Amino acid sequence: MTHKHHTAGEAPHNHTIQYGLLVGFLIIWILDSFILRITAYVYIMPFFFNIFLGIPIIIAGIYLASRSHIVFETPEPQIVDTGLYSRVRHPMYLGSILLYVGFWVTTLSLLTLIPLIAVLIGYNYLANAEERILTEQFGDEYLEYKKRVSKWIPL
């Protein structure tokens, strides 16, 4: 099986959507968790407990996001089906989502659940848009890849 690359399938406005999600999440998370403290439960539960749970999630997110850049290493658009891409179709997005979840867990801000849900919806939208593009570009080859590899949960 050849090693292939699928960055040709990037969704329209991908970076704008990701930056918007990041800014919205960070503003609400920082305001609620550290300044206004309206719904952040970090001050009720032992801080160590939140960090103990959040840091491993953040580390897993960094690992997935950093190890998934193999798609940028080949010159021509192809389907990557090795490494992390043999376990999950969107490891870079999954890594980003885990970063958001990890930061949320460190403070348990209920108000931050709103942008966290927006992050989940936004990344799923991007993944779906990219999968439509890749299906158009690679046809049956990409459909077979989708049958073999989970979209979000590594198997």
Image (cartoon, rainbow, N blue to C red):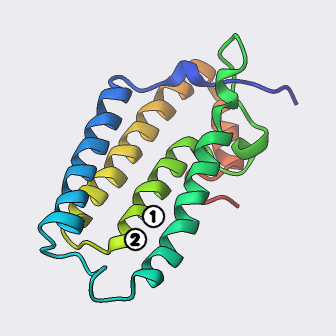
61 left or right, relative to 38 = right
* Label 2 packing within 10 angstroms: few (<14), some (14-19), many (20+): many
Q: Quadrant of the N terminus?
A: top right
| Rendered image quadrant of residue 106 | bottom left
Q: Position of residue 108 (x, y in %)?
A: 31, 75
Q: Position of residue 117 (x, y in %)?
A: 29, 59
Residue 102, numbered circle:
1
| Rendered image quadrant of residue 30 | bottom left
Residue 13, numbered circle:
none
Q: Position of residue 74 (x, y in %)?
A: 73, 17
| Rendered image quadrant of residue 140 | top right
Residue 106, numbered circle:
2
Q: Are marks 1 and 2 in contact (CB under 8 Å)?
A: yes
The type of residue carrying mark 2 is: Thr
Q: Nearer the viewer, residue 133 or 10?
A: 10
Task: Write the residue at 64% across / 22% down.
Answer: 72
Task: Write the residue at 52% across / 51% down.
Answer: 94
